[in-house]
Image: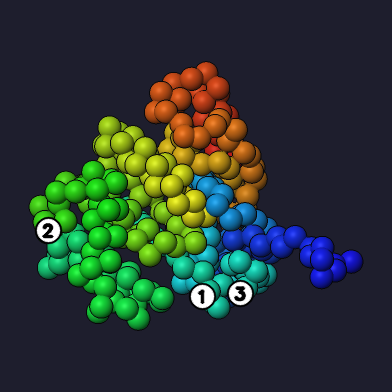
Amino acid sequence: MASATHPQPVHPRPAIELHETSVVFGSGEKAVTALTPTTLRMDRGDFLALVGPSGCGKSTILRLVSNLIKPSSGQILLGGRDAAAKEMRIGMAFQNPTMLPWLTIEKNVMLPLKIVEPFKRSFQRDKKGAYRDRVHALLAQVGLKDFANHFPWQLSGGMLQRANLCRALIHDPDLLLLDEPFGALDQFTREELWQTLQELYLDRKPTVLLVTHDLREAGFLARRICVMSARPGRIISDKAVTMPQPRDIGVIYTPEFVEMTQGLRELIAQVRK
Ligand SMILES: Nc1ncnc2c1ncn2[C@@H]1O[C@H](COP(=O)(O)OP(=O)(O)OP(=O)(O)O)[C@@H](O)[C@H]1O
């Protein structure tokens, strides 16, 4: 029993818990089961990649976690509270960065500080001081030091996605949700961005849920990879990636890594049939 002198250690609740969570879109004959009852747990600071055939429900899980949709059955908890409680700060990045074209990169990246508490309350006071410094430091970390005053249309796709990662992280989110963030980039730029994301993650340790079709991306970045079956989706494999971090890009050519991604590819090929 806990006593005043020997308190029980506090174990924070997992960042994300899905308990027998299902999602059905529509009803009657037109009902589409996007996710069969699924149980998943992510501890704080974990980095999980979700992979699987197209249409298997990966983005549906992201939408559940970001509270954009409600489960049809079961529960979804963030930090032990219902996802709707919105107590966790969330950052998101998708395949096509949606920067506001009339704002500079600095102002685009600063946007979450204008919207999300506790930053919002001192936005007017800090936007030209502490918040501006914060944005510039993050832009410098991803190699965009000299682009703060440029407009989105003046940046390449890879630079825009770097800025997009900055915007997703500027408010120190507890959860970072990434849906195919590098899908539109060429292989070289993509690999550069993997390294940038790895550095940002190891620096800040948010809980990251990454949806991707790129098995090398999953293997390079994640600490855990879950494979989903074809629709109606469910998780059929959940494995740790044991290679230590930080990982050098050369790791993707090692036999251990190639064996891991081949195993994933074969599993997905089987469930696609
Ligand atoms: N609003 C909706 N109404 C009806 N069906 C939907 C809706 N949203 C998604 N679906 C269906 O639910 C299933 C899962 O969709 P989801 O976008 O989660 O798949 P995904 O694994 O992310 O696919 P992809 O890899 O192709 O992006 C798909 O069959 C999709 O057509």
Q: Is mark 1 within 8 Å of ligand 1?
A: no
Dots 3, 2 in contact, CB < 8 A:
no
The mark lying in front, picked from 3 and 2, is 2
Element on which disc 1 rests: loop
The amino acid on which the numbered mark 2 sits, given as a three-letter code, is: Asn
**Residue 144 percent location from the top left of the image:** 20, 48
- Mark 3 vs mark 2, CA separation in Å: 40 Å
Is the residue 22 above or below the residue 144 in the image? below
Element on which disc 2 rests: loop
Please state if 24 lies on the left or on the right of 175 as rendered.
right
Dots 1, 3 in contact, CB < 8 A:
no
Instruction: Give the crowd class for mark 1: few <14, some 14-19, many >=20 residues within 10 Å.
Output: few
**Residue 249 percent location from the top left of the image:** 39, 28
Residue placed under numbered mark 3 in the picture:
82
Furthest-right residue in view?
1
Please state if 173 lies on the left or on the right of 273 as rendered.
left
Residue placed under numbered mark 2 in the picture:
149
